[in-house]
Image (cartoon, rainbow, N blue to C red):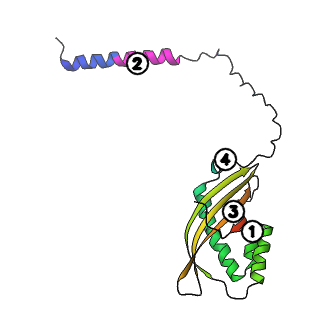
């Protein structure tokens, strides 16, 4: 009677033989007489008419992300926070050269008039407390995002003044320039 080791070895050899036979039947072998690979059929391209002006949609952030796969809302928000600080500080310093590329022509004209018409030193930005997206829209290839910034400014009094600014940024998604321009500002309270 064979011992248990011999039986285990015999069973393992049989399993290995079955596995090798199955591999051979599934994979087959090349004989050199196979048909050459056929090129994939070309997809039919149906020309689409140019889209009409698209109205802003309620799902703006999703629409923007679908239109521009590189768009990232968190990165946009971080960039908007930096732009807010840069714009507020440049306005306080009267630095028109810094402001010009960040603002639309209309907003730049308003900021320029504000700098020119100053009669007292501007309040200094103490801290940007909060920034949040309150609305967004995609109209054609133009994206608009409105944010509410809550910040503290040093005032004439000893206490800081808390201000909520509502700013709208815009960018043409076909533009090579990744920067967004400030197109509208408001000191009103942000929508809830």
Q: Residue 118 vs residue 17: left or right?
A: right
Give whichever of discs 1 and 3 has the lower sequence position. 1
Which residue shows up at 77% across the image and 66% down it?
104
Q: Position of residue 31 (x, y in %)?
A: 60, 15
Q: Position of residue 161 (x, y in %)?
A: 57, 79
Q: Main secondary structure of the magenta part?
A: helix
Q: Are marks 3 and 2 in contact (CB under 8 Å)?
A: no
- C-alpha span from label 2 to label 4: 52 Å
Camera-near label (2 vs 1) is: 1
Q: On the image, numbered disc 4 is attached to which residue?
A: 63
Q: Which label was assigned to residue 103?
A: 1
Q: On the image, numbered disc 2 is attached to which residue?
A: 19
Camera-near label (1 vs 3) is: 3
Give whichever of discs 3 and 2 has the lower sequence position. 2
- C-alpha span from label 3 to label 4: 17 Å
Task: Label 2: state its secondary structure.
Answer: helix
What is the quadrant of residue 127 in the picture?
bottom right
Q: Are marks 2 and 1 in contact (CB under 8 Å)?
A: no
- C-alpha span from label 2 to label 1: 71 Å
């Amino acid at each position: 009677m064979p011992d248990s080791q011999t039986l285990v070895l015999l069973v393992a050899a049989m399993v290995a033989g079955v596995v090798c036979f199955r591999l051979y039947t599934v994979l087959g072998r090349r004989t050199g007489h196979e048909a050459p690979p056929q090129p994939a059929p070309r997809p039919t391209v149906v020309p689409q008419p140019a889209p009409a002006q698209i109205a802003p949609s309620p799902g703006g952030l999703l629409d923007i992300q679908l239109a521009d796969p590189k768009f990232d809302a968190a990165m946009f928000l971080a960039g908007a926070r930096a732009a807010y600080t840069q714009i507020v500080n440049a306005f306080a310093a009267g630095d028109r050269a810094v402001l010009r590329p960040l603002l639309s022509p209309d907003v730049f004209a308003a900021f320029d008039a504000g700098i020119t018409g100053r009669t007292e030193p501007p309040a200094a930005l103490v801290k940007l407390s909060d920034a949040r997206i309150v609305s967004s829209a995609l109209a054609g290839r133009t994206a608009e995002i409105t944010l509410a910034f809550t910040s503290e400014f040093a005032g004439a009094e000893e206490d800081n003044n808390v201000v909520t600014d509502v700013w709208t940024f815009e960018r043409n998604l076909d533009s090579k320039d990744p920067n967004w321009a400030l197109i509208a500002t408001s000191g009103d309270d942000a929508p809830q």
